[in-house]
Amino acid sequence: MGHWYTGPAGVAAVLRVALPLMISTGTFSLVLFIDRTLLLWYDGSAMSASMAAGNLFWSLLCLPFGIASMTGAFVAQYVGTGQRQRIGRLLWQAVWFTAGTIPLFVLFAILAPWMFRVTAQPESLIPMESLYLRILLVGAVGSVLETALSGFFSGTEQTQTIMWCSIATAILNVILDVALVFGIGPFPEMGIVGAGIASAISFWFKALLFVLLIWQQADESVYGFVRGRVLDVPLLRRLLYFGLPAGLQFVVEAGGFTLIVLQIGSLGELPLRATTMAINFNMIAFIPLVGLSVAASVLVGRHLTESGPELAQRVVRSALVVALIYSAAWAGLYLFAPDTLLSLYRMADLGDDSQQSLQLARGLLGFVAMYVLFDAIQLILAGALRGAGDTWFVLLGTTVCSAAALTIGHVFEPPSEALRWWWWMITAWIWMLAVAMMLRFLQGRWRTIDMIDRREVYI
C-alpha cells in the first residue's frame, strides 16, 4: 500500500491506536444521542431541557476534564523517553487533583437555577434543567477521574482496553436510560431525572473499571503505582501548567458553543428543539473524532520524544487523512439524506410543531455539512499541538476565535432570521479555529517544546 500507509507513522499505525478510541468516544456519542432521543419520545420539553443543561454541564466540567486529559500526553512522553517509572506518581497527582474538584461541583449544583435564569432560558424549562444538571454533577468527579486514569491506557497505547470499558459503560447507560426514563419492571417512570441518574451511575462505573484494571494489570516494578501515592507538588504543578490551558481551551470552546445554544434557546422552544435535533447528528460525527484527536496527541508525544519531529509530523498527516475521509462521508449524509436521518424523530409526538421543527432541523443540517470538514481539521491539529505541549497557543487561538464569533454574533444579530444567523456564527467560528490551528502547526513552534522534565528522579 505504500510507506504513507504502512510506515511507523502511517495511516495503519494511526488507526491501530485511534480506531479503538474512535469506537470508545463513538459509544459516548451514541449514548448521548439515544439519551436525548428517548427523552424526545418521552417529552419534547425534556429533550430541550437536557440539551441546554447537558451543554452547561460540559462547560462546567471541561476545565478539570481538560487538565485530567493531559495525563495521556504525559504518559506517552514518559514512554517515549523510557521513563515509565514516573507514570504511577503522575497518575496519583491527577487523582489528588480530581478530589480537589468536589467543592467546585457542589457550588455549581447550588447555583444551577441562577445560571439558567441569567442566560434567559424559558421559565418553564428551568426546573427540569436545574434538576438534570444537579444529577449530572453527582457523576462529575467520576467523569474527571476516569478521564485521568484513561490516560494510562492511551499513553501506553492500550487503547483496546479503553474501547471495551467504554462499550460496557455504554450498554449499562442505555439499559438504565430505558428502564429509568419510561419505568420498566421494578423501576419507576422518572423521565429526565432517570436519564440523569443513568448518566451519573455510568460515569462512576467507568472510573471504577479503570481503577480495577490498573490495580490488576499494571506492573508495580515498571510503573511504581504504590510508591507513587504521595502528593508531589512539583509534578502536580507541571501537570497543571500544561493541563490548565488545555482545560481552559475546552472551557472557552464549550462555553462559547453553550452561549450560542442558550442564545438560540432564548428565541423559544421550537428553535432550541430544531437545534438539538441537528446537533444530535453532529455529535455522532464529531465525538469519534475526539478519539482520533487523542490518538494524534499521544502518538505525537511519543514520536517527538522518541525519534524527533519528522515522524510526529507524519502522524498528523495520517490522522488528517482518516479524519477528512470520515467527515466527508458524514457531510454527504447531511447534504443528501437529511430526511432519512431525521425520520427517527418522526416517531416522537412533538405536537402541532412537529413538521415545523423537523423542517428547521433539515435546514440546520446544511450548516453542519459546511463546517464538519473544518471541525475535523481543527480537532486533529489541536490534539497534535497539545501532545507536543503547545497547549497555551491552543488556548489563545480558541479564545480569540470564540470571542470574535460571539462578539460579531451579538453586535450584528439581525432582528429577523436570528436562528440562521447564529448558525452562521457557529460555522464561521469553526472555520476560524481550523485556520488558526493550521497556521500554528505549520509555523513549527511545537517541535521544540519540552513538556516533561527529564532531570527529575523519582525514588
Image (cartoon, rainbow, N blue to C red):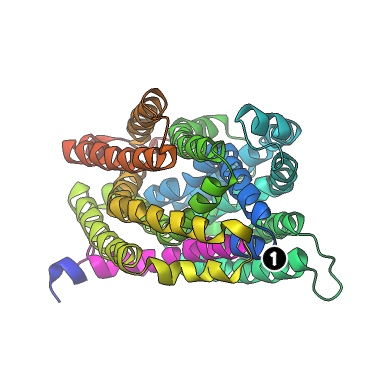
Q: Position of residue 9 (x, y in %)?
A: 23, 61
Label 1: few (<14), some (14–19) or many (≥20) C-alpha neighbours in 10 Å = many
Which residue is the site of mark 1?
177
Query: At 67% across and 30% down in the image, what residue appears?
Result: 117
Q: Position of residue 103 (x, y in %)?
A: 72, 32
Front-most of 230 and 424?
A: 424
Q: Is residue 15 left or right of residue 271?
A: left
Numbered disc total: 1
Camera sees residue 230:
no
In this picture, which residue range is highlighted in magenta? 7-35
Query: At 67% across and 57% down in the image, what residue appears?
Result: 199
Residue 10 in magenta stretch: yes
Asked where in the image residue 1 lies, by quadrant, the reply is bottom left
Q: Is residue 26 above or below residue 459?
A: below
Magenta segment, principal secondary structure? Answer: helix
Front-most of 191 and 287?
A: 191
Residue 120 in magenta stretch: no
Q: Is residue 333 left or right of residue 277?
A: left
Front-most of 234 and 159?
A: 159
Local secondary structure at mark 1: helix
Q: Is residue 184 left or right of residue 260?
A: right
Front-most of 244 and 341?
A: 341
Camera sees residue 304:
yes
Q: Position of residue 431 (x, y in %)?
A: 28, 42
Query: At 22% across and 34% down in the image, what residue appears?
Result: 445
- The amino acid beneath tag 1 is Asp
Q: Position of residue 245 (x, y in %)?
A: 44, 32
